[in-house]
Amino acid sequence: MYIKRTCLFVMLFMCCLLWGCHKMDGPALSGPDVSESQKAAVQPAPQKVHLKLTYSGKDIVWISKIEEIVASFTALYPWIEIELDLGREGVYMEYLKASKAS
């Protein structure tokens, strides 16, 4: 009898856990009659974000790869603007200190 109650409790707990963790789309945004434009109209537009990426490198290949990565990132996330800052003046840590001070 004790084992049956324990098994029942564990199964009930697992059902509640799985039910609570599933994705819930709400009735207004689900179903075959809702178009993608309607879903996009309900979702808020992301805020514009500006990031500054400071990196060092004298190797042209390294610099071009960073630019490629940033270009592909901004293609996926157009609301994130990344400003590239190539630190070429002397020692990189000194450049970061000077850049932070200004």
Image (cartoon, grey):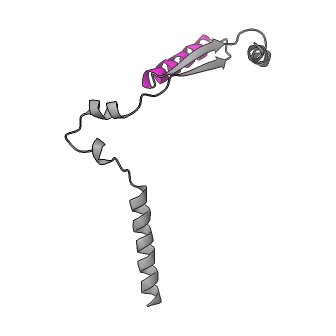
Q: Which residues are magenta?
A: 60-76
The total number of labels drawn is 0
27 lies left or right of 82? left
Q: Position of residue 80 (x, y in %)?
A: 51, 22
Image vertical order of residue 30 relative to residue 95, above or below: below
Q: Is residue 20 left or right of residue 55?
A: left
Q: Could you say which quadrant of the image residue 41 lies in?
A: top left
What residue sits 19% from the left and 40% below the top? 33
Image vertical order of residue 5 relative to residue 46, above or below: below
The quarter of the picture where the N terminus appears is: bottom left
| Residue plotted at (78% across, 19% down) | 93
40 and 100: which is toward the camera: 40
Measuring from the top left, give residue 20's x and y in whole percent: 42, 59
Quadrant assignment for the C terminus: top right
Q: Position of residue 58 (x, y in %)?
A: 67, 11
Our reading of the magenta stretch's main secondary structure is helix
